[in-house]
Amino acid sequence: MTDPSLAASVIDTSKPHPARVYDWFLGGKDNYPVDEELGRQITAMEPTAKYGARHNRWFMQRATRMLAARLGVRQFLDIGTGIPTEPNLHRIAQTAAPETSVVYVDNDPIVLAHAEALLRGTPEGVTRYLQADAREPRKILDLAREILDFDRPIAVSLIALLHFIPDEQGAYEIVRTLVDALPSGSYLALSQLASDHDEERTRRAVAMYAASGVTLVPRSRAEMAKFFAGLELLDPGVVWLPDWHAELAVDEERDGTAVPLYAGVARKP
Ligand SMILES: C[S@@+](CC[C@H](N)C(=O)[O-])C[C@H]1O[C@@H](n2cnc3c(N)ncnc32)[C@H](O)[C@@H]1O
């Protein structure tokens, strides 16, 4: 499942892929000229794009620390994981509690090619990588059930994923299917590109991605909040991403950059 040569044979370098463009924004090396080209176009229009990617990563870290260290969650299902970037989610969760189980899911073959970096977890815990598409949540749940105990709380994270899934492709139904499968006391952590931050720049970013064959779906705060229907939002609710529990941020994270992403975490009652 993690054979790099197998994955390399299906990596399409003729058009940009979200995981690789994001890797370029983060300063990674696992991207191709087409990804860099789109990254540069976006950065020329929106110079803070790279900081946005870093802030998004920091949100993942804060949310995971909160869930693992403060709320005692010991099982994580992270969908749309991305190319490994230290510290990865399992590092943070297993630092809080080494026995934590983490299941990663992504549909991009480049993530599969690098998945071994996602599997270097603690001996006490479990870390697994599944190659699957978020648009098939039942398949993901079936695979995850072989690893995670669905009678104990699970934190499902879809961090900077849902803006690649249009409503017509079932974005809300995907979240609903995942949440319905979780026991009480589980959590949902989301971040998502905002449609109402700077509408003109967002429109241009959507057009740039579209010209490269990637669909980007910004959503308003209310549309983001709908993903949490039936759940109890943790304070401070759905907010601009750097504002989500800013008190948990390390100094580096407090750079004051405005980030056009919403973030939130909620508990299943
Ligand atoms: C912007 S990256 C975010 C990575 C990571 N969650 C983070 O926040 O740092 C989005 C990831 O979602 C993945 N992705 C996009 N559409 C997907 C789908 N339908 N199923 C599974 N993964 C998907 C991409 O391959 C990419 O790795």
Image: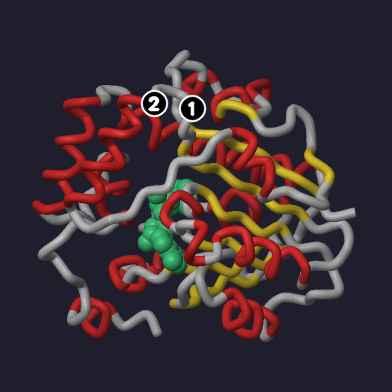
| Structural crowding at the residue carrying mark 1, measured as other residues with C-alpha within 10 Å and reported as few (<14), some (14–19) or many (≥20) | some
Looking at the picture, which amino acid does disc 1 mark?
Asp
Q: Horizontal placement of 235 versus 196: left or right? A: right
Identify the element where label 2 is drawn.
helix
Look at label 2 and name its amino acid.
Glu
The image quadrant where one finds the C terminus is: bottom right
Q: Quadrant of ligand 1?
A: bottom left
Helix, strand or loop under label 1: loop
The location of residue 13, given as percent across then percent down, is: 13, 65
Q: Is residue 164 above or below residue 112?
A: above
Relative image position of residue 259 (x, y in whole percent) = 45, 26
The answer to whether mark 2 and mark 1 are in CB contact below 8 A is yes
State the separation of the CA atoms marked 2 and 1. Answer: 6 Å
Judging by the rendered image, the residue that carries numbered circle 1 is 196
The residue at the far top in this view is 256
Image position, residue 268 (x, y; %): 83, 55
Q: Can residue 56 be seen in this view?
A: yes
Query: Relative to 20, is 33 on the left or the right?
Result: left
Residue at horizontal 37 percent and vertical 80 percent from the top: 2
Label 2: how many residues lie within 10 Å, few (<14), some (14-19) or many (20+)? few
Query: Which residue is labeled 2 in the image?
Result: 199
170 or 25, which lies in front? Answer: 170
Place of residue 234 in the rendered image (x, y in percent of width and height, measured from the top left) = 79, 37
Q: Which residue lies furthest to the front in this view?
A: 168
| Residue drawn at the location 72% of the way across and 48% of the way down | 228
